C-alpha cells in the first residue's frame, strides 16, 4: 500500500511543525489564488488572472518574507504602471513595439539597481499590451493596478491570518 509508505517517509523527514507549516503554505496559496480570482470576477475586473498570480507572487514561507515581497511588489507595480503611462503619453506615435522597448528599457534599468523591482518590467509590458481595441493606456494601467493590488492584498491577508491562527498563540 502506498499511503503508509508515504506517511512513513513524511514522518521520517518532516517534524510535526514542518508538516503543519508546509500544509498551511499549500492551503494558504490555494486559498489566496482562488479567493483573488473570485473577488476579481465579482468586481468585474478585466483580467482576473493577474489578481490570482499576484496573490501567489507575494506568498512566501514566512510572514516577514511575505511582507517584504508585498512591499516590493506594490512598489514595482506602481513603477511599472507609471513608466508605461509616461511612455504612452510621451510617445503615442511610437506604436506598441516602440513604447514597449522604451518602457522595458527604463524599468530594466531601475531593476538593475534593485532586483526586488523586477516586477515593474512585466507590469509595464502587461499595461501596454493589454489595452483592448478602442481602450486607452491609462484605463489599462488602472485596471492592471487594481488586479495586482487586489491579489497582493489577499495573499498577504491570508498569510497574516494563517500565521495568527496557527503559529502565534496568545500567552
Image: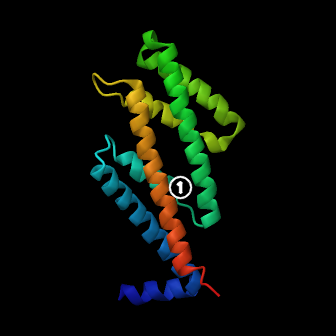
- Give how far across and how far down residue 83 sits, in percent: 55, 27
Task: Note whether 146 is above or below 133 in the view shown.
Answer: below
* Direction from residue 60 to residue 5 in the image, left or right: left
Task: Note whether 88 is above or below 49 in the view shown.
Answer: above
Q: Residue at x 28, y 52 (%)?
A: 42
Q: Which residue is mark 1?
A: 58
Point out the image quarter for the N terminus: bottom left
Q: Residue at x 53, y 80 (%)?
A: 166
Residue 145, by quadrant, is top left
Count of picture labels: 1
Q: How is the image coloured?
A: rainbow
* Direction from residue 167 to residue 127 in the image, left or right: left
Q: Residue at x 45, y 64 (%)?
A: 29
Q: Can you name the residue that lies furthest to the right here? A: 113
Task: Note whether 36 is above or below 125 in the view shown.
Answer: below
Residue 141, by quadrant, is top left
Q: Secondary structure at mark 1?
A: helix
- Give how far across and how far down residue 55 sits, in percent: 46, 55
* Residue 56, visible in the rendered structure: no
* Residue 150, visible in the rendered structure: yes
Work out whether residue 166 or residue 138 is closer to the camera in this orientation and state it.
138
Q: Residue at x 52, y 66 (%)?
A: 159
- Give how far across and how far down residue 103 sits, in percent: 54, 24
Few, some or many residues within 10 Å of mark 1 (<14, 14–19, 20+): many
- Give how far across and how far down residue 85 sits, in percent: 49, 25
Point out the image quarter for the C terminus: bottom right
Residue 143, by quadrant, is top left
Amino acid at each position: 500500500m502506498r499511503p503508509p509508505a508515504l506517511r512513513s517517509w513524511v514522518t521520517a523527514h518532516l517534524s510535526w511543525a514542518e508538516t503543519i507549516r508546509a500544509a498551511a503554505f499549500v492551503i494558504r496559496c490555494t486559498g489566496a489564488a482562488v479567493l483573488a480570482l473570485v473577488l476579481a470576477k465579482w468586481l468585474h475586473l478585466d483580467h482576473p488572472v493577474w489578481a490570482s498570480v499576484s496573490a501567489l507572487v507575494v506568498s512566501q514561507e514566512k510572514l516577514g518574507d511575505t511582507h517584504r515581497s508585498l512591499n516590493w511588489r506594490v512598489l514595482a507595480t506602481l513603477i511599472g504602471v507609471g513608466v508605461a503611462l509616461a511612455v504612452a503619453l510621451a510617445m503615442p506615435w511610437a506604436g506598441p513595439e516602440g513604447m514597449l522597448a522604451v518602457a522595458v528599457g527604463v524599468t530594466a534599468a531601475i531593476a538593475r539597481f534593485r532586483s526586488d523591482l523586477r516586477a515593474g518590467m512585466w507590469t509595464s509590458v502587461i499595461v501596454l499590451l493589454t489595452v483592448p481595441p478602442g481602450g486607452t493606456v491609462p484605463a489599462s494601467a488602472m485596471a492592471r493596478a487594481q488586479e495586482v493590488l487586489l491579489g497582493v492584498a489577499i495573499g498577504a491577508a491570508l498569510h497574516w491570518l494563517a500565521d495568527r491562527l496557527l503559529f502565534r498563540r496568545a500567552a
